[in-house]
Image (spheres, helix red, strand yellow):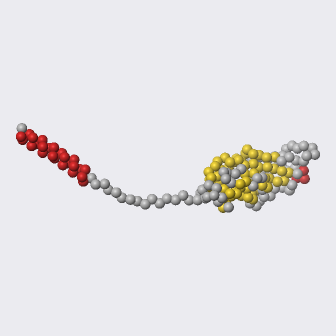
């Protein structure tokens, strides 16, 4: 019985030593690494759809009516360059025929200011100013055609509208 107690005591001591030695020698190992990060200035613009403005009827003695397409074109815009950092400008590829005006009204993203309907030419025109940090999709815009009777008959034609985001 005495030998049995010694064997059990030694076995218990050995188990404690092994368990204790295992945890005592497992010291935490720590190291570090530098993480470099950046968010660059990102400005994106995407135009969607197409517009159709046709003057096909009028009222005697009242001249030709303006025609507006407010559903055909939208735009998506993303800008993280800061408050009042960007503006939208626009133009068409060539001048309109005599006695006609093609205009655009760009609805503003949050916080910006619209110039309202702006007559388009082959030179850039300010359309929206004061663009802040924004991320909006499907923002509407309207195209309007005005013509006088002096314009005569004009066959269907297409203008390419270009809108650009630039620094304010």
Question: Residue at the left extreme?
Answer: 2
With 113 as the anchor, is 147 left or right in this view? right
- Residue in the picture at 62% in, 52% down: 134
Residue 165 shows in this picture? no
Residue under the image location 70 percent in, 47 percent down? 140
**Image quadrant in which the N terminus is located:** top left
**Which residue is rendered at x = 86% and y = 46% of the image?**
65
Image-based side of 141 in relation to 147, left or right: left
Residue lying farthest to the top in this orientation: 1
**Residue 45 visible here:** yes
Query: Foreground residue, 74 or 20?
Result: 20
Q: Is residue 26 left or right of residue 10?
A: right
Q: Is residue 129 above or below residue 141?
A: below
Vertical position of residue 168 compared to residue 15: above or below: below
In the picture, measured across the screen, residue 123 lies left or right of residue 61, that is left
In x, y percent, where is residue 3?
6, 41
């Amino acid at each position: 019985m005495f030998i049995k107690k010694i064997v059990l005591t030694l076995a218990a001591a050995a188990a404690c030593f092994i368990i204790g030695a295992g945890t005592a020698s497992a010291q935490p190992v720590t190291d570090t690494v530098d993480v470099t990060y950046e968010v660059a200035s990102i400005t994106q613009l995407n135009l969607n759809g197409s517009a159709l403005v046709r003057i096909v009827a009028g009222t005697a003695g009242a001249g030709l009516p303006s025609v507006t397409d407010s559903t055909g074109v939208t735009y998506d815009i993303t800008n993280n360059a800061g408050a009042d950092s960007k503006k939208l400008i626009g133009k068409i590829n060539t001048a309109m025929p005599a006695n006609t005006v093609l205009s655009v009204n760009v609805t503003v993203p949050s916080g910006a200011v619209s110039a309202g309907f702006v007559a388009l030419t082959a030179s850039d025109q300010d359309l929206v100013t004061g663009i802040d940090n924004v991320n909006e999709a499907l923002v509407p815009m309207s195209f309007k055609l005005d013509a006088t009777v002096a314009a005569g008959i004009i066959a269907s034609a297409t203008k390419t509208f270009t809108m650009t985001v630039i620094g304010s």
